[in-house]
Image (tube, helix red, strand yellow):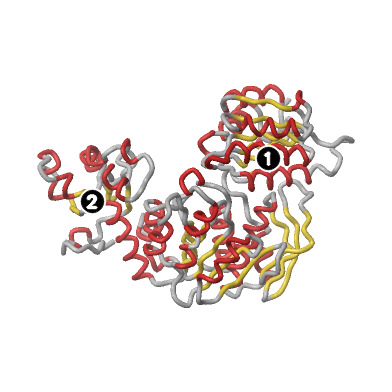
Amino acid sequence: MRAANSSGVAEFFDNKITGFSIDSRSTAEGELFFALSPVDYARHGFNGAETAADAHDFIAQAISQGATAIVARRERVAGDQQLENFRAQLLLVEDVIEALQLLAQSVLREWARPLVGITGSAGKTTTRDLTAHVLGASGRRVLKSKKNFNNELGLPLSILQMETMGAQPSDYDMAVLEMGMSTRHELRRLCEIAPPDIGVELLIAPVHLEFMKSIENIAAAKAQLVEGIKPGGTAVLNADDELVAAMRAKHDGPVITFGVEQAADVIATDIDATRLGQNHFRLRTPLGEATVELPLPGRHNLMNALAAATVATCFRIGAEEIAASLATAAPSEMRGEVLEFAAGFTIIDDSYNSNPRSLLSMVRSLVESCGRPHEGARRRTVVVAGEMLELGTDAPAMHREAGREMGGFGVDALWGVRGLARELITGAREAGIPSDSIRFFDSSEEAAHALTAEAREGDLILVKGSRGVRTDTIVRAMKERFELKDAEAKSGGRN
């Protein structure tokens, strides 16, 4: 690629860059390495900036692995003789993160095709994947965010996929980008880097309260996506979320809404969530209606699918075509994956993250799917719920209330994992779940050991928790101990 910059040395990079890296350990031949430092992290509001490694210390490693050039902070290089020795391969800037962002911004500006930005307190990755899937099924070539790359570093790196490993911007017709938020002004900056033609607001929930202090502050920060939509662009809003619906006032252009409980442009009716891992519903859009068989569990995933359908409607894709593509969607990793084990139990792996709203949605889905007998008896429902992080000062009460609600759903067993998950147990006990059906574990490793010993045929097990609790450890342990049903079928079964 030819990387534009203000130093007049664009020719230095012409046809030499094959990719981009911020980790010297994985930097490959031909890549441009961005040497991030604590100063850059602190300037951009990243948590833990003071303890972050200084990648300038690893410039020699990146060059030895074949990096074409290094973007380094001028102030850091000055006077460092070892770094001065690499001067011919250094592109010096004042702010390395800003340089990465400006490069991505310039790529988008020249590309000049439709961009969909998606935010919300939960569901961003699943909605991104569903939206890209539906648009891709219509024949459009879609660039989407990598993994959960949704912050001031991840967003530019996702955009720069257009210029990686031989790709070029003309290979893509549109982009679907996830935009996250952990500081009050982060979304504003993301919209400066990548102004959306369509901005999607999913929901406002009490996450990041530890830093944001109030739900109103969260809503105001999330609304920066709507405020950052390009002139004439479209806002896609969740009509069922009062705080999101109020964002209509922040956008002068077209607004299209989705929902179930409130009047909306794109809605779901005749909802049936009794089949494990599925949502069956009637989709109604301004372009028609169709029956949808969505292979994802929970009301929250139904809403994610409606958001994707609404974006597709903006591109004049009809309801029947949307329904056909949603039927072939798959859960994002650790976000509602249904794992059937040869031993006869089932795990729903929703271990990527958790908050009260999404936890209760998944538990409700789990219980609803148990309405049918399993070999003459109702299947036992087991919820393994990790601590929910970043909920602020009200976190204990939120955990207790979630435990009470789960008890009211009719959960058969509830296991809490780490920290404030003990409050989940307290709430469940208050709701009447018997003491012998409630357990607490100090770590995911302890819970994994217990579950491998106690899972039994017919069990429906939900594993969910905030990322920092590492409840994916539990799922991994079960996969190591027990064979998946598909694996048994492929190997011809066991003797």
SS of the residue at dot 2?
A: strand
Circle 1 or circle 2, nearest the eye? 1
Q: Which mark is residue 401?
A: 1
In which image quadrant can residue 414 be found?
Answer: top right
Q: Is residue 489 visible?
A: no
SS of the residue at dot 1?
A: helix
- Expressed as whole percent of the image width and height from the top left, the position of residue 473 reads 56, 31
**Residue sitting nearer the eye, 300 or 426:** 426
* Residue at x 71%, y 42% (from the top left corner): 363
Q: Is residue 440 left or right of residue 141?
A: right
Q: Is residue 283 visible?
A: yes
Label 2 belongs to which residue?
A: 71
**Residue sitting nearer the eye, 322 or 57:** 57
Density class for disc 1 (Cα within 10 Å; few <14, some 14-19, many ≥20) is many
- Expressed as whole percent of the image width and height from the top left, the position of residue 428 reads 72, 33
- Expressed as whole percent of the image width and height from the top left, the position of residue 329 reads 63, 55
* Residue at x 42%, y 51% (from the top left corner): 183
- Expressed as whole percent of the image width and height from the top left, the position of residue 199 reads 51, 66
Q: Which mark is residue 476?
A: none
In which image quadrant can residue 12 be found?
Answer: bottom left
